[in-house]
Image: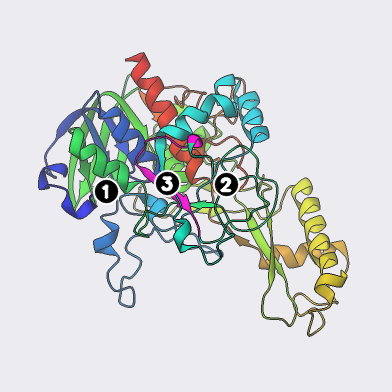
Amino acid sequence: MEGIFRLPASAFAVPFADAAYDYVVVGGGTSGLAIAARLAKTASVAVVEAGGIYQIDNGNQSVVPAYAFTQGFTSADPLRPGKTLGGSSVINNMAYHRATVGYHDKWAELVGDESYGFNEVLPYFKQSTHHNLPDNAKRAMPNATVTYNACVFGDGPIEISYSNHVDPRSHGQCSGHLAGYGAWNVATMTADAKRSSGQDYLVHAIKTTNLMAYPHTQVTKILFDAGRATGVTVKTAGIDYTISANKEVIVSAGAFHTPQLLMVSGVGPSETLEALDIPVVADLPGVGQNLQDQIFFDVMYGISVSTSSLSTFSFEGAEIARRHDSMFDQPIIDLGWLSDPADAEVAVAIFKRARAAWETSSLGSIKATPELVPGAAVSTDEDILNYIKGGARPIWHASGTCKMGKADDELAVVDSKARVYGVEGLRVVDASVLPIIMPGHPMGTLYMLAEKIAAEIQAEA
């Protein structure tokens, strides 16, 4: 596939001038480029991205400002979502897999829409990917032949291949079953070992549609007229202008910036908005609430490796709040580590399970020292919980801050078609709408979601 460097200049919109498109997509990340590319097949689309091109902005990370392709937040825990065309899909661990059948059943139940069942969304999973066949000639052992089911992939822009390690006892991680252990079985790697990311949607769309990209452009506010989203105000290199949407504005700014943009634009908890003197367009208490992530923590011994425990429980007390009325100010992010009693109970149980594993004959025989971290002094449930709260780190799968749900759910922000409640012409399509955090890595699910919502929008047009 041709790289982003081969895109013509006409692929990028001329900044500083007001313009109008059928759809304006805010955020050119994992979901944003996917839905923009699909909609551009039948309509005019602009995708507005605060970052630039990763391959250029990456540069020399040893000099200031470094990390030009991530959005750094000031918090006790490192949070760096992607700020570049392709978003976090160009800086993550390239893990592609799909959530479980049970997860999709729960998703369908929570939003009251059976179309989120695993079998129902499988066509959209397939539509986003295509499969590079494994090269058995490169296997270290002649008996290490890779088996695979190519029919679970389609002919989409995201290239999928097996990683160097494939567990012969695993049933794969794209069939709705994630039981087992070990590294992911498939990764977004091309045949020439290069990363495949959301940028590939952009490259493909530019060759076949009139999709226009606005890099290094910050959306400052969503515009409304009589309760309908009509466009966005943006800023490029200090210059303000307007990009209008004839049909819809689609926000794909991620779990942190999507709720921030909604609140700055008057969509969110009325008490918060009024305190900041932001006119209320729609009172939605759930905007910025329900922040969920996965965490990991350690039980370490004096050997050459450590074991980390990963949990998919949510942080019920976590939230994102506004302190100012500008998109250029960082949001207040309260991760609320394990504030829910059920989460805390599960975390302690996982820790005890990991510790017990080191007392088995298999692992006990390789221990060179007593437990180093956190050490035998951490013994009671209270001690364990305090250790986890103090040492746990996020997996950087933040989601749920504009969750999808039924109309009678007071914390729901969007319906099952990703339409924002209380207004018209506005949707949210990114990790923020996941009603509950999925098991494992969300990238594949976000591609699927973008494909699904794009198809529904086109069906309604």
Residue drawn at the location 37% of the way across and 21% of the way down: 457
Picture coordinates of residue 64 (x, y %)? 30, 74
Whichever of callouts 2 and 1 sits on the residue coming sooner in the sequence is 1
**Residue with the mark numbered 3:** 257
- Front: mark 1 or 3: 1
Picture coordinates of residue 303 (x, y %)? 71, 81
Asked whether residue 162 is drawn in magenta, I would say yes
Magenta extent: 151-163
Identity, as a three-letter code, of the amino acid under mark 3? His
Residue drawn at the location 35% of the way across and 59% of the way down: 194
Work out whether residue 293 or residue 154 is closer to the camera in this orientation and state it.
154
Q: How many marks?
A: 3
Left or right? Give the position of 337 relative to 446.
Answer: right
Whichever of callouts 1 and 3 sits on the residue coming sooner in the sequence is 1
Identity of the residue furthest to the front in this view: 142
User: Local crowd at mark 3 within 10 Å, few (<14), some, or many (≥20)?
Assistant: many
Residue 424 visible in image = no
User: Which quadrant does the C terminus fall into?
Assistant: top left
Contact (Cβ within 8 Å) of mark 2 with mark 3:
no
Locate residue 184: give its quadrant. Answer: bottom right
| Mark 2 → mark 1, Cα distance in angstroms | 40 Å
Looking at the picture, does residue 89 appear above or below residue 259? below
Identity, as a three-letter code, of the amino acid under mark 1? Met
Looking at the picture, does residue 330 appear above or below residue 126? below
**Residue with the mark numbered 1:** 1
Identity, as a three-letter code, of the amino acid under mark 2? Glu
Left or right? Give the position of 339 relative to 99.
Answer: right
| Mark 1 → mark 3, Cα distance in angstroms | 31 Å
Where residue 319 is drawn, which disc sits there? 2
Asked whether residue 318 is drawn in magenta, I would say no
SS for dot 1: loop
SS for dot 2: strand
